[in-house]
Amino acid sequence: MSNRILIVDDEQEIADLIQVYLQNENYTVFKFYSAKEALKCINETNLDLAILDVMLPDGNGFTICQKIREKHNYPVIMLTAKEEETDKITGLTLGADDYITKPFRPLEMVARVKAQLRRYKKYNSVPVPDEAIITHSGLVIDVNTHECLLNEKPLSLTPTEFSILRILCEQKGNVVSSEQLFHEIWGDEYFSKSNNTITVHIRHLREKMNDSVENPKYIKTVWGVGYKIEK
């Protein structure tokens, strides 16, 4: 069965363009121009990924992202029409995994979709050894079930947050740069020094784990280098 992708954008030409490129990759596309129709699809359809425009005539992509995260953990990519950090940070904080600024290159969109699906399927569908359980100071990460516990309480993490925490724990004691994290997670070449995607996800992780920047119990910032979890 092909991957099922939701596209929500009130700019018909953009939505149609994304649809063509994704269908050329043999994805099944559900395309809508309004929030109301999209929300109905989310409730009735088993999806594998969502591409959400921030600005919609009857709502916004942030609200749709929140609704998705109430029940689902498949990847969400936000589309923003302007280079405003606030839009990007808001989307990531609400559970989005990536964002793309308009205008964008269609092939970049396809690459990001593939990267998100590859990672999502890897940790949700493909069996991994039963011993793939990582533990550290009250933190338990089960790579097989994609679940995370902190002091025996479940942590609700997005796929990207889960991946970052898993990588840092697997590299326990070593510093992992933002570039390394980005390429490990997205697997593409679109990282740039100005990209604060990883920074936002790290901050959100710390908030969920009640971890501080000044006296971290888990994620330590090594300034100018990257992040690490001490052994």
Image (tube, rainbow, N blue to C red):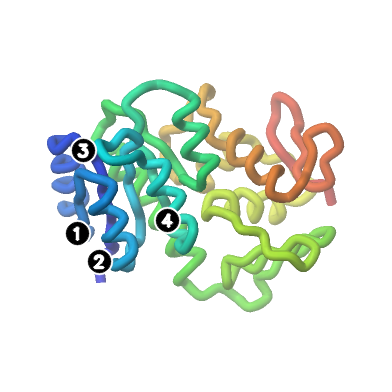
Q: Secondary structure at mark 1?
A: loop
Which label was assigned to residue 10?
A: 3
Disc 2 residue type?
A: Ser
Q: How many marks?
A: 4
Q: Secondary structure at mark 2?
A: loop
Residue at the image point whose x is 25% and y is 72% from the top: 1
CB contact under 8 Å: marks 1 and 2: yes
Q: Residue at x 73, y 50 (%)?
A: 209
Amino acid tagged 4: Ile
Precedes in sequence: disc 1 or disc 2: 2
Number of other residues with Cα within 10 Å of mark 4, as a class: few under 14, some 14 to 19, many 20 or more: many
In terms of image quadrants, where is residue 189?
Answer: top left
Question: In the image, residue 57 lies at what x, y percent?
Answer: 25, 36
> Closer to the camera, 125 or 216?
216
Does label 2 or label 4 sit earlier along the sequence?
2
Q: Which residue is mark 1?
A: 26
Amino acid bearing label 3: Asp
User: What residue is shown at x 71% (from left), y 54% (from top)?
Assistant: 169
The correct choice, above or below, for 226 with respect to 72 in the image is: above
Q: Is residue 29 above or below residue 83?
A: below
Mark closest to the chain's N terminus, 3 or 4: 3
Of marks 1 and 4, which one's residue comes earlier in the chain?
1
Q: Which residue shows up at 54% across the image and 53% down it? A: 158
Separation of marks 2 and 3 at Cα, in angstroms: 25 Å
Q: Which residue is mark 2?
A: 2
Q: Single out the mark in the foreground, 1 or 4.
A: 4
Q: Which mark is residue 68?
A: 4
